[in-house]
């Protein structure tokens, strides 16, 4: 009898770890490394709030599976989903266009009628790109537009959301809402140049007359130090067309010029007045104003501006965790796969189908806006890890890797883990009560690992969560 019990216990000893490693249980018994457990204790953080998945890229067996199937908020690690899905659905060479049409071709440099500007969701359409559009119009000989400028952003459906809902900061650029015709990530540039006349020390771009600028900045003739370089920028009614930019505080005349970015006013006002300013600076003239509208069939195409490739955009999005770029890219997938106008609901369906086609088990996953700026987004460490391992084996592995912040070198990882510089490519994520990271690590042994760390706990974003992650990455680098 004693022998039989011993054999049963031995069999269970062999079977249970296999179930933990390959099954889909909520809790796994794989212990965290002792150095990680010690760091959790030092930071007064709870291991039960942490999910970890570590697996060699060339293996089917994880090295660490701590709560691998617990649905957790991934914060900006969600951008990995947007990036990997976009490479599959759109392709790495996909480019966005912005088109200029007119009711009729120009005659002697004059367009009699309206000019149309149609956006197709370019996530990184800058003022420099708008200047290129203007330059090409002038090369065509266009010097006067006698109608209105019609702005067509119908490629995306309007986003019925409050940009201040997330954290009551609708003026912050990370809260900017997507739009198919978006200039400069929807940001207003507020430039402070303290060397000249106080009346012209503060300027804004675009030069939007709808926006009020009220500056009471105090310029002082003192050395530039922390206490003499303290401008304060407030935006009153930022989501209204007639928002007001208020600049106050103290700045030394010896300080260098600096630029700040805020969301203020209507993005269509900003686009039109930037276009008008650039067109007029090139010697052109616009008689009318702007209005919403649709590109009319039969109109004459004058200019088609092409963006850089998707791969380049993903580099910008992931290295610096650009939220509105992620949202634009997610909506573009919806428009291309399900037709226009794109909606977030269509985008979620597209990503869910894509995950299923890749053989990913995403039960319970919540994608929402694809940027991770969300309180409801959810993924498990295993789901992200399986996606990263699938990406490693895909034709676009190099493109995925190149977008990720590199430890000790660039992006949001530039100041972390300098002693293992270049060995970890990690997308980071931070929200209130969330610290997350996921990507790839090359250990001292030369073996590559998928790493996912999702930590949801009050106050984890205040440095402690980062130290726990760094302890895990350091352990894996030395022991993997």
Image (spheres, rainbow, N blue to C red):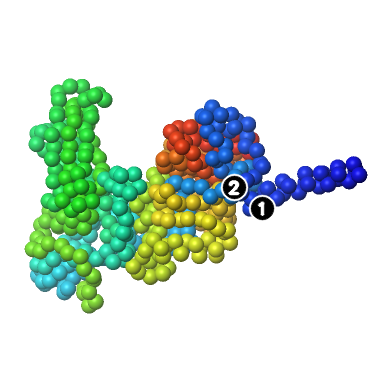
Which of the two residues, 149 or 98, is positioned nearer the viewer here? 149
Residue topped by disc 1: 23
The image shows residue 11 at horizontal and vertical percentages of 81, 47
To which quarter of the image does residue 340 belong? bottom left
Measured along the vertical axis of the image, is residue 224 above or below residue 17?
above
Element type where label 1 sits in the image? loop
Instruction: Identify which residue is drawn at 34% across, 52% down.
Output: 324
To which quarter of the image does residue 473 belong? top right
Instruction: Identify which residue is drawn at 59% across, 50% down.
Output: 69
Task: Say if mark 1 contacts mark 2, CB within 8 Å.
Answer: no
The image shows residue 362 at horizontal and vertical percentages of 55, 57
Q: CA distance from mark 1 to mark 2?
A: 10 Å
Residue found farthest to the bottom = 298
In the picture provided, is 101 more to the left or to the right than 466? left
Which badge, 1 or 2, is on the more N-terminal residue? 1
Instruction: Identify which residue is drawn at 20% across, 47% down.
Output: 237
Residue topped by disc 2: 68
Q: Note whether residue 406 is visible.
A: no
* Quadrant placement of the N terminus: top right
The residue carrying pointer 2 sits among few (fewer than 14), some (14 to 19) or many (20 or more) residues within 10 Å by Cα, namely: many
């Amino acid at each position: 009898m004693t022998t039989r019990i011993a054999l049963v216990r031995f069999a269970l000893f062999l079977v249970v770890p296999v179930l933990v490693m390959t099954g889909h249980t909520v809790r796994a018994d794989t212990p965290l490394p002792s150095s990680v457990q010690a760091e959790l204790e030092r930071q007064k953080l709870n291991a039960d709030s942490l999910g970890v998945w570590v697996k060699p890229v060339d293996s089917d067996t994880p090295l660490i599976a701590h709560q691998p199937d617990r649905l957790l908020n991934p914060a900006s690690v969600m951008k990995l989903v947007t990036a990997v899905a976009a490479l599959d659905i759109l392709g790495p060479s996909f480019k966005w266009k912005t088109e200029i049409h007119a009711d009729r071709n120009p005659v002697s440099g004059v367009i009699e009628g309206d000019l149309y500007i149609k956006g197709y969701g370019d996530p990184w359409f800058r003022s420099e790109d708008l200047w290129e559009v203007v330059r090409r119009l002038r090369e065509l000989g266009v010097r006067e537009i006698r109608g209105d400028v019609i702005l067509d952003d119908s490629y995306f459906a309007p986003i019925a959301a409050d940009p201040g809902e997330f954290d009551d900061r609708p003026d912050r650029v990370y809260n900017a809402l997507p739009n198919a015709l978006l200039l400069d990530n929807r940001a207003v540039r507020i430039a402070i140049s303290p060397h000249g006349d106080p009346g012209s020390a503060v300027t804004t771009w675009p030069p939007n007359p709808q926006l009020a600028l009220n500056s009471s900045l105090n310029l002082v003739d003192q050395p530039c130090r922390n206490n003499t370089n303290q401008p304060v920028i407030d935006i009153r009614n930022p989501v209204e067309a007639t928002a007001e930019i208020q600049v106050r505080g103290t700045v030394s005349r010896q300080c260098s010029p600096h630029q700040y970015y805020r969301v203020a006013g209507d993005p269509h006002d900003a686009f039109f007045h930037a276009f008008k300013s650039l067109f007029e600076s090139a010697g052109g003239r616009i008689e009318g104003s702007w209005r919403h509208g649709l590109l009319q069939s039969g109109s004459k195409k004058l200019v088609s501006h092409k963006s850089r490739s998707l791969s380049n955009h993903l580099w910008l999005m992931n290295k610096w965790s650009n939220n509105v770029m992620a949202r634009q890219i997610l909506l573009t997938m919806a428009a291309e796969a399900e037709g226009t106008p794109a909606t977030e609901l269509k985008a979620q369906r597209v990503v869910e189908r894509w995950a299923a086609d890749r053989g990913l088990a995403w039960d319970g996953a919540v994608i929402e806006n694809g940027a991770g700026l969300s309180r409801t987004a959810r993924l498990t460490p295993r789901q992200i890890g399986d996606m990263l391992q699938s990406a490693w084996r895909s034709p676009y592995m190099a493109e995925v890797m190149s977008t990720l912040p590199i430890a000790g070198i660039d992006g949001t990882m530039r100041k972390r883990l300098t002693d293992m510089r270049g060995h970890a490519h990690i997308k980071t994520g931070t929200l209130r009560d969330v610290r997350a990271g996921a990507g790839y690590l090359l250990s001292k042994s030369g073996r590559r690992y998928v790493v996912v760390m999702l930590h949801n706990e009050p106050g984890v974003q205040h440095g402690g969560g980062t130290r726990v992650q760094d302890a895990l990455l350091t352990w894996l680098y030395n022991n993997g």
